Amino acid sequence: MLKSNNSIYRLLIAVLCLAFFSCKVAMPNIDLVSFNLNPEGAQVELKAENQNGFAVTTTNIDLQAFYQKKAVGKLSNDKSIKFPAHQSVVFYLQAKLNSEAMLQAAPNALMLVLQGKKLPLQVQGEIKVKVGGIFKASIPVDTTLMIDPRDFIGR
């Protein structure tokens, strides 16, 4: 009898935790650290703060990049990334950007380079995470990264 009550209590706690975690998982601040072109596209170094009171681990990152509302690429990472509770983590994503689309979307890119201005790259999508190795959640992402156009033409 005692063993079955323990199972019921564990199930009840798991359901309550799942309801709590699925509503509360968030990482609102994602900042660009660096943007480097490479033969596969670009490596984007980002920094995000896990403001939750619990650790989360990514299972899938699927983000789309837009410039002037035009799709210009995709950012992803196949490896899991652990974000400890209340800590900032620097992590890397591989960016497959269509530089031709970027140039078409930014006809004044040369002027931006000469003026020292950066391109606002809108990033949208979701980061799928696991909490406690058991519960799954999705973190919506909608942020703007400021990219130096000289990274596309080499410095």
Image (cartoon, rainbow, N blue to C red):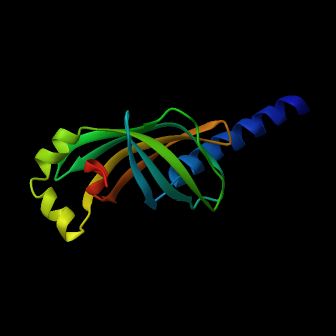
Q: Nearer the viewer, residue 136 or 104?
A: 104
In percent of the image, x 21 and y 51: which residue is there? Answer: 67
The quarter in which the C terminus is drawn is bottom left
Measured as percent of width and height from the top left, residue 43 is found at 43, 44
The quarter in which the N terminus is drawn is top right
Q: Nearer the viewer, residue 95 or 55?
A: 95
Measured as percent of width and height from the top left, residue 125 is found at 36, 44
Measured as percent of width and height from the top left, residue 143 is found at 35, 57
Q: How many marks?
A: 0
Q: Residue furthest right?
A: 2
Displayed quadrant of residue 18: top right
In percent of the image, x 24 and y 48: which residue is there? Answer: 66
Q: Is residue 58 left or right of residue 29?
A: right
Measured as percent of width and height from the top left, residue 86 is found at 63, 62
In percent of the image, x 55 and y 54: which residue is there? Answer: 90
Q: Is residue 133 left or right of residue 32?
A: right
In percent of the image, x 47 and y 54: which residue is there? Answer: 46
| 116 up-or-down from 58: above or below | below
| 155 up-or-down from 125: above or below | below
Q: Nearer the viewer, residue 95 or 85?
A: 95
Q: Nearer the viewer, residue 36 or 124?
A: 36
